């Protein structure tokens, strides 16, 4: 299986949005006001305007996507302006377990390294157990609790620049 990670192209909009909706569907029972929440998730491609949207493509089919928001780009107030931020890692349910998430996170970490970010941040929830396991396994550490999002608990996780190459090595070893 050959997976290529590349930058988003306008023609990717509909597949990226569909994958985002499919990837989050398993969490429907956890979120209050699910219709509003999934409506926002289903516009993931719009995030390409504020960051680097990467897609993972396998055999010509988009299997996942993620956004890297570099230093100085618009972001949530929970992240300092000089950090890089990973947003909306999504993998199509049928393609999970094939290392696609790891490849996408590696693309974000490489972009953060190239941007000279002192820290890479992200927010996630314990309900997203597989993503949380991956993030902590490569070195992200929880540094604060965040207000719940539509009744779901979230935390902010960070990876310092000093630990970036180690995280990339871990991702490359298992991808």
Image (cartoon, helix red, strand yellow):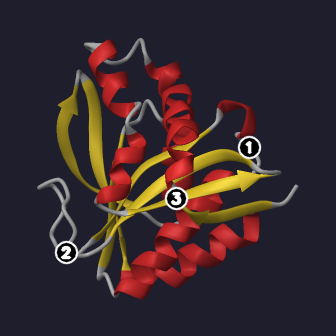
Horizontal relation, residue 3 to residue 29: left or right:
right
Residue 38, located in which quarter of the rendered image?
top left
Rounded to the nearest whole Å, what is the CA distance between mark 2 and mark 3? 20 Å
- First reached walking from the N terminus: tag 3 or tag 1: 3
The residue labelled by disc 1 is 97
Q: Residue furthest left?
A: 77
Residue 27: percent from left, percent from top: 45, 21
The residue labelled by disc 2 is 72
Rounded to the nearest whole Å, what is the CA distance between mark 3 and mark 1? 22 Å
Query: Can you see residue 99?
Result: no
Could you classify mark 3 by the number of other residues whose Cα lies within 10 Å: few (under 14), some (14-19), or many (20 or more)? some
Q: In the structure shown, which secondary structural element does the residue marked by tag 3 occupy?
A: loop
The residue labelled by disc 3 is 8
Residue 110: percent from left, percent from top: 51, 78
Q: Nearer the viewer, mark 2 or mark 1?
A: 2
Horizontal relation, residue 137 to residue 51: left or right:
right
| Residue at horizontal 31 percent and vertical 57 percent from the top | 49
Query: Can you see residue 140?
Result: yes
Q: Nearer the viewer, mark 3 or mark 1?
A: 3
Q: In the displayed structure, would residue 81 be above or below residue 113? A: above
Could you classify mark 1 by the number of other residues whose Cα lies within 10 Å: few (under 14), some (14-19), or many (20 or more)? few
Residue 58: percent from left, percent from top: 77, 52
- Which corner quadrant holds the C terminus? bottom right
| Residue at horizontal 20 percent and vertical 58 percent from the top | 75
| Residue at horizontal 64 percent and vertical 36 percent from the top | 92
Horizontal relation, residue 23 to residue 154: left or right:
right
- First reached walking from the N terminus: tag 2 or tag 1: 2
| Residue at horizontal 29 percent and vertical 82 percent from the top | 118
Q: Nearer the viewer, mark 2 or mark 3?
A: 3
């Amino acid at each position: 299986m050959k997976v290529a990670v590349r930058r988003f192209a306008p023609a990717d909009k509909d597949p990226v949005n569909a994958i985002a909706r499919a990837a989050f569907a398993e969490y429907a029972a956890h979120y209050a006001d699910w219709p509003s929440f999934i409506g926002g998730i289903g516009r993931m491609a719009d995030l390409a305007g504020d960051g680097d949207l990467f897609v993972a493509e396998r055999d010509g089919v988009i299997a996942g996507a993620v956004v890297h928001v570099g230093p100085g780009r618009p972001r949530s107030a929970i992240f300092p302006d000089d950090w890089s931020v990973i947003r909306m890692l999504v993998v199509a349910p049928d393609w999970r377990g094939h290392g696609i998430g790891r490849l996408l996170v590696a693309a974000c970490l490489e972009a953060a390294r190239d941007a000279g970010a002192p820290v890479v941040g992200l927010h996630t929830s314990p309900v997203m157990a597989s993503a949380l396991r991956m993030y902590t396994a490569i070195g992200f550490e929880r540094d604060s609790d965040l207000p719940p999002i539509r009744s779901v608990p979230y935390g902010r996780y960070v990876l310092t620049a000093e630990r970036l190459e180690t995280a990339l090595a871990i991702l490359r070893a298992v991808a």
